Image (tube, rainbow, N blue to C red):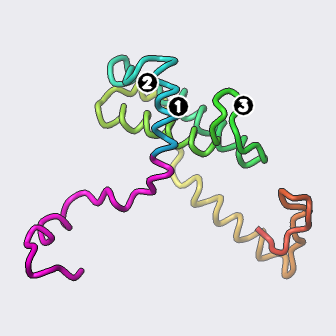
Amino acid sequence: METKDSNPKDLIGIKKVPYSCLPLPVIAECAVAMLEGACKYRRHNYRVVGVRASVYFDAAFRHLSQWYEGEDIDKDSGMNHITKAITTLMVLRDAMIRGKVNDDRPPGTSNFIKELNKKTEEVLAKFDNPLEPYTNKDGNADEYCG
């Protein structure tokens, strides 16, 4: 990175948290979603009372699933499901950083995804020319597999 000779602060500033890398429109949407949560549950309540990991996992997964199934806007909040998923994960992560998570995840399964990835490769290897998906979100045939 190039710096100006006249500003030695550049050499120090570029080594600090690069907030300028954040997508500000998304951060602004998250701020509004967090405001909704503050109005409903009290601002920063999760920092005081903590959260249950499974509750936030479930909420994030529901928002992602609803978005993936074609529903862009959450009917309760009027906000994008992706924004709602991001803010759910922000609360979970903040609670984790502060040691305020009731970690009620089930016992882990080692190599589960690694083994499924191998199985996926085996399935795909059986088909030289797999059929395309039937339709995309717009109801048109997709042009690619996957």
Mark found first going from the N terminus, 1 or 3: 1
Which quarter of the image is occupied by the C terminus?
bottom right
- Picture coordinates of residue 97 (x, y %)? 31, 37
98 left or right, relative to 62:
left
Q: Toward the viewer: 63 or 79?
A: 79
140 left or right, relative to 37:
right
Residue type for callout 2: Val
Residue 144 seen anywhere in this rendered image of the structure: yes
Residue annotated with mark 3? 75
Mark found first going from the N terminus, 3 or 2: 2
Say if the magenta span includes residue 22.
yes
Q: Residue at 72% of width from left, 41% of height from top?
A: 66
Residue annotated with mark 1? 56
The residue mark sitting in front, 1 or 3, is 3
Residue type for callout 1: Tyr
The local crowd at label 3, few if under 14, some if 14 to 19, many if 20 or more residues have their Cα within 10 Å, is few
Q: Are marks 1 and 2 in contact (CB under 8 Å)?
A: yes
- Rounded to the nearest whole Å, what is the CA distance between mark 3 and mark 2? 24 Å
Magenta region: which residues?
1-27
Residue annotated with mark 2? 51
